[in-house]
Structures are given as structure tokens and as C-alpha cells.
Image (cartoon, rainbow, N blue to C red):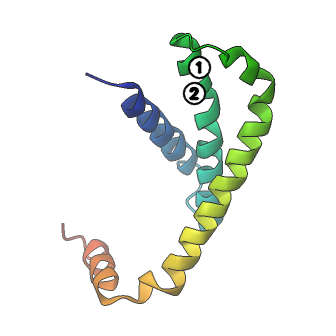
């Protein structure tokens, strides 16, 4: 059975992958992460509305602000992840071996 968290994560993955169909540059990865993060706010609001949680109507005017905050958080997280990967992880032997294996077409 597909639960709400499963559906939520799959929809965010679809949003992220559809955006990456247009461009796969590092800056677009960061932008797409922010956009997918911000898309989680209205999806959560919609789910809470469907489940008729009390007080959910009070959040409706705050959705744009919450989406902007989540967009910035997503971008900051992606920037931090990109920085850590480029500065530390990409130099590790295990990561280089995985990248070489992937580049050579082996599974």
C-alpha cells in the first residue's frame, strides 16, 4: 500500500528528475533541489487538508513564505553537499573507484 510519505517522496523525485531533463549542470542541480524542497510545502498542505487536520486553513496565507524558506534551505543544503563532495568525498579512493566503474560502463 502506498502511504503518504511514499507518495510525497516519489512526487518530489519526479519533480527533481523532470527539471533535470532540461539541464544537468551543477548550478541547475542546486536550483532543482531548492524547487523540489519548496514543492513539498503545498503537497504537505494538501495532504493535511485532505486529512482535515484542525487549523490547517490558518497556514494557507503563509504558504508562499514557507515555500520561499524551503527553497532557500534546499539551495543551502545542495550547496553544502556539493562543496563537501567536491572538496572531500571526490578525492576518496572508494568514490573514485565507483566513478571509474560507472564511466567504463560496468555495473
Tag 2 residue: 43
In the depicted view, which residue is nearer to us: 71 or 21? 71
Residue 2 appears in the rendering: yes
62, above or below 85, in the image = above
In the rendered image of this protein, does residue 34 appear above or below residue 5? Answer: below
Q: Neighbour class for label 1 at 10 Å: few (<14), some, many (≥20)?
A: some
Horizontal side of 65 relative to 87 (left or right) equals right
Q: Quick check: can you spot residue 31?
A: no
Query: Measuring 46% from the left and 42% from the top, which residue is drawn there?
Result: 13
- Front-most of 3 and 53? 53
Q: How many numbered discs?
A: 2
Say which quarter of the image contains residue 29: bottom right
Note whether 17 is above or below 59 in the view shown. below
Marks 1/2 in contact by CB < 8 Å: the verdict is yes
Residue in front for this viewpoint, 46 or 54: 54
Q: Residues within 10 Å of mark 2 (few under 14, many from 20)?
A: some
Residue pointed to by mark 1: 46
Amino acid at each position: 500500500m502506498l502511504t503518504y510519505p511514499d507518495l510525497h517522496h516519489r512526487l518530489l523525485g519526479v519533480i527533481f528528475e523532470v527539471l533535470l531533463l532540461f539541464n544537468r549542470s551543477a548550478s541547475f542541480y542546486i536550483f532543482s533541489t531548492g524547487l523540489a524542497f519548496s514543492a513539498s510545502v503545498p503537497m504537505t498542505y494538501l495532504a493535511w487538508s485532505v486529512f482535515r487536520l484542525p487549523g490547517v486553513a490558518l497556514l494557507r496565507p503563509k504558504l508562499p513564505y514557507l515555500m520561499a524558506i524551503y527553497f532557500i534551505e534546499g539551495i543551502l543544503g545542495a550547496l553544502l553537499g556539493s562543496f563537501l563532495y567536491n572538496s572531500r568525498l571526490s578525492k576518496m579512493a572508494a568514490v573514485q573507484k565507483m566513478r571509474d566503474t560507472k564511466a567504463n560502463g560496468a555495473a
